[in-house]
Image (cartoon, rainbow, N blue to C red):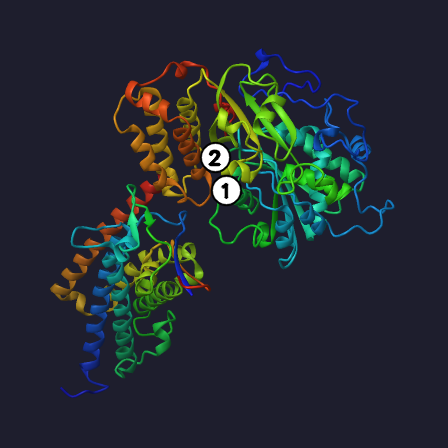
Amino acid sequence: MRVTLRVNPIACVRHGMCAELLPELIQLDQWGYPILTAKTVPRPLVDHARRAAQACPTLALLVQETAGKHR
Amino acid sequence: MSFSLHGPGLWYATRATGLVTLLLLTVSVLLGILTAGRFSSAHWPRFLSQGLHRNISLLVLVFLALHVGTTVIDTYTSIPLAAAFIPFASSYKAAWLSLGAVALDLLAALVATSLVRNRIGHRTWRRVHWLAYACWPVAMAHGLGIGTDRNAAWVFALAVACGVFVLSAAGWRLAAAARAGAQ
Amino acid sequence: MTTMALSPYRPQPPEARRPGVVPTRALPPGARQPGVPQPGVRLPRLLAGIGARPAGLEHHDRFYGPMPGRGRGRGRPRRLIDVVEASGLTGRGGAGFPAGRKMRSVAAGPGSKVVVANGAEGEPASLKDRLLLTRLPHLVLDGIALAAEAVGANESYLCVHGNQEMLLDSLHDAVEERQAAGRDPVRIRVAGLPGRYVSSEQSSIVHYLNGGPGIPTFSPPRPHERGVNGSPTLVHNVETLAHLALIARYGDRWFRGAGLPSAPGSMLVTVSGAVAWPGVYEIEMGTPIGRVVMLAGGPVEPLQALLVGGYFGAWLPVQAAWPVPMTHAGLKAAGGAMGAGIVIALPASCCPLAETARVVRYLAEETASQCGPCMFGLPALADALGHLAYSGGRNGAIDRITALIPVIEGRGACRHPDGATQLVRSVLRAFPADARWHERRGACAGVARPPLLPLPDDEERDRDFG
């Protein structure tokens, strides 16, 4: 099972909490919008990713689980 | 001090928990405004405002439950449990008590929608959450109107201080929202 | 961008060329006879019935033959979806997705369906959809009706930009003509979209038809899962539906009689720029680009590059582009994209950087302003490219542009920013020497030349999204 991150760019209004809570995978560009440095979330960071998604005030960060080979 | 359903102990507990609830509610509203206003500094990340706001709101529920509980089981005044939710369900200081019921209902809506935020979507959640700006003044009015403590100087001063903080923060937040909307 | 000089059988003299005025050209009469397709004659297909005036229903039926499934002695035809899949028809709106597969996935959805024909043609350099809708509307309307029947739709829409009033009127008339003839069980509704560039995007159209503004939405869900009124929605370009109308009549084997096995059929291309006869042409898929340029009369000046795919496409140097076949795969392999079949010939006297800078500025103004990287990134890209083109002379100008591209690409809800970044990347890749020259010396002589790439006039542009 693969856990992936995705940003809904329409909902995102650059609160920036995701980058604070998941700095390993999310950085902010020069305008404050999130850049995902990796799509797949490594096992140890899944809980942090879920927390970051919960924290987003506009629910723009999505943590999706896809059935498939875990790379 | 012995615990008695008839003595003043419960009454003190009601007033104390009510006061604490109001204080915590004020702090929660301020933290919510900080979150929406995207406040952050070197030592205060944004998720801190939000995390504290959520946790303190839950704490508000705890103290509110204690406040309601001590009021209901106090046999000195026969206030039914329904009065906590339904306005004018009790004759004891009906108007001021009803304000408390309204504030509790609003708070219940705020917390319930926040707990199921993922399911109802951001837009619906946001529309309901504006009710927070109604909940706080109603709760404050309930506390000042019904309480005998308002005559105590320190309580009054505390209430005024809360009022000043919330009104200025809310004013700043609403002005910023209006500016963003106009752009 | 509004008028089209009509002279199907005579080439236009070069002085009639202006950005936006693109006459049409079809084969002279006698090269083909109406009715059943002739063996050995592969082209024209769509444009076979084209004339100087819009083709009415009677002329259309007489020319292309009767619409199938009307009980005219053909026996029970195969399910249209099977035929379309077997034909290998791909979308002609730019993405090139297999049309049959799209129809099948919509048909498999629950409940009633909706068919939407996208005739908005937001690309300023493309005129093929406009041609079909003005001169051969019944081909498109047949396609809509057939697709609606095939997927089980009870609603169908034909969408064009709302600021084209004459087109809307003529389409309304065509639909009325069909209703009077009892033609379409599902009445086709003609809808006018906001005149913005992103409003012609698939999810924008669905958003608008659902009562919202004509701006893209986040997917999932995709239109074929949940679109107009929550129903599975089939969105096809009008040219795709026109091909479908002919496939339903003549079959998949006929369709595969032209083009390549991997890219069957014919397509419409809009050729403009420094060619003798700019216009809309019908070619077989896989025709080398050089041949397409020669079809349009060949270059009138020495060329330096071709813009293939429009503003969602890429610049290709002339020598490299000439033998490349017009297929999605072929163009992708050459570092380009087919887009909606647009070929613009750039003469050597033009400055490709200045032309691209103008286009990127237009694209930056046309963002829906929903997604940060597009809303802020495209204007920054336009500024950077504009500086390089018009006032260069600063070190690192190219680096600034190349640094912006990965920050913008792929981070929007739709492909609008990606089109701009692809265009900019291709101009730097095709003209590295020019870019370096500009960086050191500033504007070149070509900057002063009148602009070549067409963009809508200011008065024609809507301000809001409806």
Identified by mark 2, the residue type is Asp
What chain letter is assigned to the residue under label 2? C
C72 and B166: which is toward the camera: C72
Secondary structure of the residue carrying numbered label 2: loop
Tell me which corner region of the image, top left, top right, bottom left or bottom right, holds residue B31. bottom left
What chain letter is assigned to the residue under label 1? C
- Residue A26, given in percent of the width and then of the height, sits at 30, 52
Q: Is residue C331 above or below residue C146?
A: above
Q: Quadrant of the N terminus of chain B?
A: bottom left
Q: Is residue C260 above or below residue C11?
A: below
C345 and B69: which is toward the camera: C345
Identified by mark 1, the residue type is Pro
Q: Is residue C119 visible?
A: yes
Q: How many residues crowd mark 1 within 10 Å: few (<14), some (14–19), many (20+)?
A: some
Residue C213, label in figure: 1
- Residue C135, given in percent of the width and then of the height, sits at 70, 28
- Residue C420, given in percent of the width and then of the height, sits at 43, 34
- Residue B162, given in percent of the width and then of the height, sits at 19, 58
Q: Residue at x 28, y 60 (%)?
A: B136
The residue tagged 2 is C464
Q: Are marks 1 and 2 in contact (CB under 8 Å)?
A: yes
